[in-house]
Amino acid sequence: MSRVLFIGNSYTFQNSLPKVLEAFAQALVPEAPLQTEGVLVGGATLRSHQAHGVASQRIREGGWRYVVLQEQSMLGGLRIDGVAYLGLPEDSFFPAARQLAAQITAVGSRPLFYMTWSRKENLAAQGHLTRAYARIAAELGAALSPVGVAWERVRRERPELELYAEDGHHPGPAGTYLSACVLFASIYKRPCTGAPSTLTGTPWTGSGFDASRAVKLVSLPDDTARYLQRVGSEVALAEHPPENTDTAPAHPPLPSLPVGAPLRLEQLAGEWSGSLSLYPSDMGMAPAALRLSLEAQGTELSGRVRVLFRNGRSIEAPLTSRLEGDPLSFSFEDAALLESTVQLRAVLKDGALHGIAQAQDPQGGRWRGSWTARRPSP
């Protein structure tokens, strides 16, 4: 029996994907079954798995034929003015993947990258995901399971076949079935055709697989299952993943500071009001109202910041500030939402502060935004 360890998040544990893979193996190669285990945390990136240490501990146990690495669906994520975009793989995905892959090969196992799919509203983003996973797998000499490529093909050939759950990014039953088929073909180097359309296995309970019971994990019409088997097999067993020639940028330019007037501390002291676009716009949190209260103390500037969201939530914190030539730079701790330090910089232009904001969350996601503030009218 071959043992396979999955390291990932809800894209793996939704519909108990590892156990669906086991069911494929049991049906098609009963003489060579799989035993799957997982270190699976909702929303986790490979960077956060590597930092927390549980994944590394399980890797060091050894005895794994493959360790499957699934990065967070947005590659760690990047928010610009509150809008979500794919993260740059060089920022978080690649460094964490290199560290985990080194641990995997050190115990005689092989890393296998589980390429995810783009979100339902943004099919074009698949090209960026495909290139990122293909690059790191090639660099490390790792195996690659091009699940996202299979999803893209199905979406183009059969747009009426629903692969997604209701949220438009997690897998529905057909999406999990297709993903398991591609993984099976990638591991066994043989088609997944001929598998049952209904598969049973142990369910995910939120913290692990419940080995005490077996349930129906996926059940599809026979013709749908046969189609997904064919696509999954052809994609997984192709000599090279299809090349994506889309050269569209993954995200718009990052916010930048305009040219401003020279700053003096006495110009900045007092109350300022404006808006901040940094937090999730899809949750109604951008733009948010921004209030600054600044006080000049000798050659230093102190104060407080308040961020007021339309949903009634707010952040209030002391500011740590300094002048860096013309730009004003200050920061505050957001322990409640981003769990991170938010850095703000600004210049004075036409009587208003025009600034940029940035932060990095514990998962490695980057947040970039813009803000403006003016003195209240007399």
Image (spheres, rainbow, N blue to C red):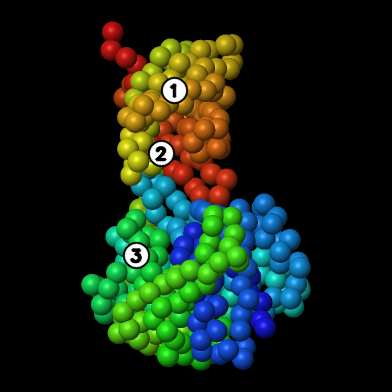
Give the residue type at disc 1.
Answer: Arg
Looking at the image, the residue that sits furthest to the left is: 160
Residue 237 placement (x, y as % from top left): 47, 88
Query: 10 Å neighbourhood of mark 3: few (<14), some, or many (≥20)?
Result: some
Q: Which residue is mark 1?
A: 306
User: Which image quadrant: the C terminus?
Assistant: top left
59 displayed left or right of 315: right
Q: Is residue 46 visible?
A: no
Give the residue type at disc 2.
Answer: Tyr
Residue for point 75% across, 72% down: 62
**Which disc, if any, is residue 164?**
3
**Which disc, if any, is residue 65?**
none
Residue 364 placement (x, y as % from top left): 55, 50
Comparing 320 with 283, the one in front is: 283
| Quadrant position of residue 167 | bottom left
- Residue 368 lies, with reference to residue 153, above or below; the image says above
124 displayed left or right of 271: left
Residue for point 34% across, 76% down: 220
Give the residue type at disc 3.
Answer: Tyr
Q: Secondary structure at mark 1?
A: strand
Q: Earlier in the sequence, mark 2 or mark 3?
A: 3
Comparing 354 with 324, the one in front is: 354
Marks 1 and 2, how far apart at CA: 14 Å
Q: Give the label, 2 or 3, closer to the camera.
A: 3
144 displayed left or right of 53: left
Query: 10 Å neighbourhood of mark 1: few (<14), some, or many (≥20)?
Result: some
Q: Which residue is mark 2?
A: 279
Q: Earlier in the sequence, mark 3 or mark 1?
A: 3
Q: Secondary structure at mark 3?
A: loop
| Quadrant position of residue 323 | top right
Looking at the image, the residue that sits furthest to the top is: 378
| Quadrant position of residue 288 | top left
